[in-house]
Structure formats: C-alpha cells, structure tokens
Amino acid sequence: MSDELSERQQKILKLIVQEYVQTGRAVGSKALIDRYKLGVSPATVRNDMGILEDQAFLQHPHTSAGRVPTDSGYRYYVENLLGNPRVPMSEQIRIRHQFSQVEMQVAASMKLAAAVLAEASGNIALISPPRSIQETVRHFELISLRDHLILLILVTQSGTVHESFLHIDDPVDQETLSATSRQLNDEIRDMRHTEIQLQASRHESFSALVLEQIAALMQRTEQESTAELHSEGLERALRQPEFSHGGVAQQLLEVLRGGALLSVLLPQVRQKDDLRIFIGSENVSDELQSYGVIIARYGATNEVTGLLGILGPTRMPYDRSISTVRYVSHLLSDLLRQVHADEPEQ
C-alpha cells in the first residue's frame, strides 16, 4: 500500500501520528504548516489529508476540524514510516546500570524491567516470569532440619526455586539424605510431574515420599504459571485522556484482572526475542480492541520463556515503546542465560 501514497502524503501522515501521539488533540492543516513549514499551501495539505482519510488512514472526529489516525494509519506508520527505532545509547547505558544494581535474580530483574517499560512508554508494562512450556526438574536437595523434619529444595529447568517441608516418622541423617538426593536426581532429571509420579510408584517408603512431594510441587507450578502476569504503571496510564471516563478505566482494570490476558497474549508470540504489535481492532480478543499492545518473549531458550510488553491506548509512542520492549527483552534473555550458565552441573 506504500506505493499508493506520495512522499508528501507519507510525510503528512507521519507528522499527524507524531503530533497526535504527543498532544492527544486532532491535527489540522494549519497546525502542520505553522509548525513544520511544509512549503505547500493549506489547500494542498487539506487535499492530501482528504486522500489519507479516503484511504482509511485518518478519520475526522465530529467535534474537531482536524484529523486523527485510525488503526490502519498507525499500522502504516509502524510498518512503513517508523524505520527500526533504537534505544539511544545514553538510555541503554542508564538501563544497563539499573540492572547491574539489582541482585542477579529473576524476580528482581522482572520488577525492574516492568518499571523501565512503564516509564519509557507512559503506559502499562506487562511481564510474566519465565516458564518452561513443559516444566521439568533440574535438580533438588534434601536438608535435615530436625530429626523428623526435612527441607526439600527443588529447582526447575526454568530456574524457579521451590521449597517444601517433609515430615517423617523415623530420623534420617544428612549423609543418607545426600546419597538419596544424588540417586534420585539421576533418575528424574528432565522429567515432568506425571513421569515423576510414575517413578514414585516404583520406589518404597522414603524415596517414594520424596518423589511424590516433588511431583506435587511440579504440578502446582504448572497450574500457577498460567495465571502469572504482573503489571506496572497503571496509575500513570490512567492519567491519559483515553482513560478519563470511569467506564473506560473500569474496563481497563477488568482486562488486567485474573489470568485471561496472559492466555490470550502468549500464543501470539511463538519464539524467544520475537516482537509483535497489535493495534486496536487487530487484537484477537474483543477486550483488547481499544488498545495497542506490544509484546515480546524473552528467555534463555525457546523452551523456557516469559512474556513482556506494553498495553496502552492506540495513541502510544510506538518508536520509544517498540525499541524499549525489544531492548529490555534482550537484556532479560542475557540475564537468564547467565543465570543458567552459572548454576553448577549436578
């Protein structure tokens, strides 16, 4: 469709998108000429704006003489006029410094990533923890706390750590616990909870108890991971004019509640470091068709990934939002690779 617009019409569309994103007000021909010195008459600009409206890239609000972009106008802008936006080097340095100040833990890095995205976009940052598509065991340890109490520490392939207590009738010394851990780790490494349950049926007494506890932890992890989507920046986003009416704000809150949003977004991004942009009516969910969504996967591998992105009105700073989502997703992927590399082999 880019061949159907002249260079001047593309420039006018780009300026209208940028002006509307910045001000939230419909853009008229006089404002474009006065601000950007286009070197053509107001009649020429009005004619080009009429062509852009006929092409469904602009629309004419009833209460204004100016024009605003449509979903198609934003899409044309993103695909043909935006180029490949990058986070400025000074901002990259600042963000990397922020990440260097937090502990190298997934939870702390997720919280920082959400704050960075919300600040850069002025909208709502979304992030889910890295999870394996089919969560499996990496390793576990058994630690004696008291004669009848044992601490079970389980690490999954996604790097998530779980702790649980085992109450036993007969005391077991630490040497025996360590030997049992070594033996069972060799048996169940890379297994899912259903496979571990089957393995437990082949053991007796204490080993069976340990395996049943691990299987239960794994199953709970898989169930919880489908609903974990954290958000940041809601208060800032609600200050935008699109959310000034109570009904719209309430709708946004309902979109963010529960785990439905994650189940809608996850299938849209298949591969790690892939980035997708959905503008208004392009969203597959009816609940999201008033919003713009920029999402990407991050992770150490394509099997262990999380989701991060930005949710806001279609009138969002796409250049800054896209570049920041892409940059932060790469940072988190690097972090996870480092976390996985630093963990000792079992």
Image (spheres, rainbow, N blue to C red):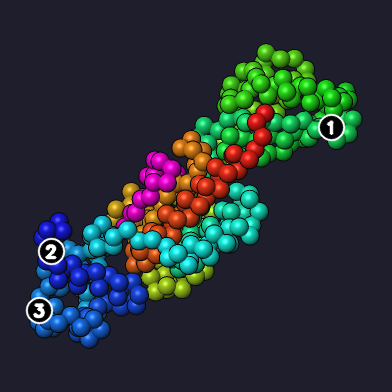
Residue 7 covered by magenta stretch: no
Q: Quadrant of residue 272?
A: top left
Residue 211 percent coordinates (x, y): 69, 24
Q: CA distance from mark 2 to mark 1?
A: 73 Å
Q: Which residue is labeled 2 in the image? A: 5
Q: Secondary structure at mark 3?
A: helix
Circle 1 residues within 10 Å: few <14, some 14–19, many ≥20: many
- What percent of the width, then of the height, locates residue 286? 34, 53
Query: For this rendering, which residue is in front, 302 or 193?
Result: 302
Q: Amino acid at mark 2?
A: Leu
Q: Earlier in the sequence, mark 3 or mark 1?
A: 3
Tell me which amino acid carries mark 3.
Thr
Q: Is residue 214 above or below residue 9?
A: above
Q: Is residue 72 visible?
A: no
Per the image, the residue denoted by label 1 is: 144
Q: Amino acid at mark 1?
A: Ser
Dot 2 or dot 1, earlier in sequence: 2
The image shows residue 93 at horizontal and vertical percentages of 51, 63
- The foreground one among 237 and 151 is 151
**Position of 291 relative to 24 (above/below):** above
Of helix, strand and loop, which one carries label 1? strand
Q: CA distance from mark 3 to mark 2?
A: 14 Å
Q: Is residue 242 visible?
A: yes
User: In the rendered image, which residue does mark 3 sit on?
Assistant: 44
Quick check: 81 left or right of 272? left
Position of the N terminus by quadrant? bottom left
